[in-house]
Each structure stands twice: as C-alpha cells, then as structure tokens.
C-alpha cells in the first residue's frame, strides 16, 4: 500500500478526533462575525467548502480566497488560514500583512513551523499531518474540525456520521467505468463545490488525469460539451433534477452517492486518484512537479523542496 493510500484510509478516526477537539477549542469564528477563510490549493478548496457551510448554518457572512488573492483592504472580524505545512509563503505573507489589524486563526499540521508565530491563534492538528505530498487526511480533517465547530447545519450530517460514511467509502468497490475512463468531471452545489474542486485536483496531482470541476448547475452551460462515452460525470450530493438524463443522452457515465455524506464521497475520489495513478505507472507518493510545500524565493520554488505541492499546503 502506498503512503498516500494508508493516510487516506486513516481519515474516519481523524475526523472523530477533530469533532472532539472542536468542542473545547477557543478561537473558532463566533456566530455573527464576518469571516474570511484562506489557503492555497487544497487548503483553499477546503476554505470554499467551510465558507459555504458557515453561511448555511446562519452564522454570518463568510468569504473564501486563495491567499495570493486575498483582498486585504476589506474589513473582517476574523481571518482563518488553513496550512498543512505551516511554511507556505503566500499564507505566511498574508498573515504578516494582517497582523494587528484583524484576529487570525491558523489550522496547521506541524507545531514546529513559522505559522505558530505568524497567527494569533493556532489549532494544531498534528495527528492528521501527512508524509505524502498529495493531501488527503489533513485537508478533510481541517474541514471536519471547522464543520464540527459550527454545530448543527441544516441538511448536513454531524461529523461523526460522516466518519461512519467514510468507513463505508473505504471498502466499497470502485466501478470499472470509473477506472477505465479517459476524463472525469466533478460537480457540487453549495459547500460541495469545494469538494468537487478538490476531487479534480487529486486526480490531476496523483494520476496526471484530465479532470474538471464546476458548480453543478453550470454543467449544462458549456461543460456538458465534453461528456461522452468513456467520460465520467461525478456529482457530490444529490444531482440536480434532469442531470442524470442529460449525461445519459450524451453517452457519459454518471456517478453519484447521495446517501453518503459528501465529505465521505470525497474519500471515494481520493481512492480513485491513487488507483488510476498506479494503473498508469505513476507513484502517488511521488507526484510529478510537486513538493510538499510551496516555499518561494525570488526565482520560484525554493530549491530546498521543503514541504507542499502547488496543490498543497
């Protein structure tokens, strides 16, 4: 088993631990605060999911930005940064710019990194840190932690139930049509759009695959043009009405698991990425052109190769 596959399989226990930790952590966004959530790559996609969940919970206006595109002139009551490595250049630069002007919270996997001094408060999820370049369990655990801190969200399962669903997702066989496809399109609505973006990224990183991701209702506004035999359309959550018929008419394969928590369904996509990578002769533990953390110097990524992927952080 690859290291990436082993870390993928550990997620249910990580989520349960995150749910417990969130109940006692002091520093999460409070109801009514105007909040911005930020990160790079995978962490940004988790920020998108959390922002939508927090608004769905009625807890306040919540925006999500890639750290390099953060609008520092806007006013927020709190900024949340997600950074697995705690070393990502864009995240650290942003936290430095915000210091003293707005309270900041960082979620990180390593307490021995610069983010500990860069943010006002840090939630260290070191039990979910990873050796792999390609993120799986840290990203989903960070989202599980933030999600649990929201309390009940209408239409969304508690994190403990999501963990039980993830255990099922780890053992359910992947359909052959998924494994032999030439192209995959991932779709989501609301908070699951961030998961769709992340699923596509996993396929690109681990397998070098042709994947795309869109809001589910945008699929028929152009992306359906690439649907056809040997191509998969995967929806997180319940698909929009009529979408299954549209995919079938185009000759594509629709994948949907509406009974599963969408975060658990992401585990299916992570498993798919590893399996497709291995079938193509790629090592998912050593993806092409990626390092575990993006640490920039004036000429680009630091030659030290320290810790994230252009996905990563």
Image: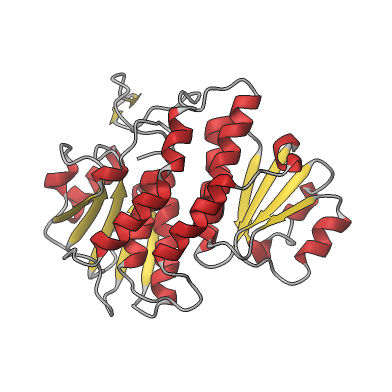
In the image: residue 88, left or right of residue 223: left
**Residue, x 75% and y 61% (percent of image)?**
220
Residue at 83% across, 46% down: 228
Q: Quick check: 303 left or right of 51?
A: left
Name above or below for residue 305 compared with residue 160. Answer: above
Is residue 197 at all visible to an observer of this figure? Answer: no
Residue 182 x %, y %: 74, 36
Q: Position of residue 128 (x, y in %)?
A: 31, 44
**Left or right position of 136 against 150:** right
Residue 208 position by quadrant: top right
Q: Exactly how many numbered labels are in the figure? A: 0
Residue under the point 66% across and 37% down: 210
Dividing the picture into quadrants, the one containing residue 65 is bottom left
Residues 155 and 1: in front is: 1
209 on left or right of 89: right
Residue 22 percent coordinates (x, y)? 26, 63
Q: Position of residue 225 (x, y in %)?
A: 79, 51
242 and 11: which is toward the camera: 11
- Image quadrant holding the C terminus, namely top left
58 to 37, vertically: above or below: below
**Image height of 48 relative to 293, above or below:** below
The colour scheme applied to this rendered structure is secondary structure
State whether residue 236 appears in this view. Answer: yes
Nearest to the observer: residue 137 or residue 76: 137
Residue drawn at x 34%, y 57% is 16
């Amino acid at each position: 088993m690859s290291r990436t596959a082993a870390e993928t399989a550990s997620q249910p226990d990580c989520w349960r631990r995150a749910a417990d930790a969130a109940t006692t952590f002091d520093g999460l966004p409070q109801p009514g605060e105007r909040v911005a959530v930020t990160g790079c790559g995978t962490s940004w996609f988790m920020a998108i999911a959390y922002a939508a969940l927090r608004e769905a919970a009625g807890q306040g206006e919540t925006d999500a930005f890639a750290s390099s595109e953060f609008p520092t002139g806007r006013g927020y009551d709190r900024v949340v940064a997600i950074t697995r490595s705690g070393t990502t250049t864009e995240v650290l630069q942003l936290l430095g710019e915000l210091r003293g002007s707005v309270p900041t919270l960082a979620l990180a996997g390593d307490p021995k990194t610069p983010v500990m001094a860069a943010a006002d408060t840090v939630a260290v999820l070191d039990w979910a840190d990873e050796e792999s370049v390609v993120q799986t369990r840290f990203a989903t655990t960070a989202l599980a932690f933030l999600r649990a801190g929201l309390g009940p969200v209408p239409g969304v399962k508690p994190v403990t139930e999501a963990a039980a669903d993830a255990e099922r997702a780890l053992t359910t066989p992947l359909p052959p049509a998924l494994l032999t496809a030439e192209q995959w399109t991932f779709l989501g609505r609301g908070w699951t759009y961030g998961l769709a973006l992340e699923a596509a990224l996993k396929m690109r990183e681990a397998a070098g695959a042709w994947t795309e991701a869109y809001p589910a209702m945008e699929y028929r506004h152009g992306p359906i043009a690439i649907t056809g035999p040997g191509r998969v359309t995967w929806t997180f959550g319940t698909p929009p009405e009529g979408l299954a018929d549209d995919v079938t008419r185009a000759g594509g394969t629709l994948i949907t698991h509406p009974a599963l928590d969408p975060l658990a369904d992401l585990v299916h996509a992570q498993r798919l990425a590893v399996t497709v990578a291995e079938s193509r002769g790629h090592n998912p533990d050593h993806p092409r052109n990626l390092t575990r953390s993006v640490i920039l110097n004036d000429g680009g990524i630091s030659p030290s190769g320290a810790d994230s992927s252009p996905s990563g952080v």
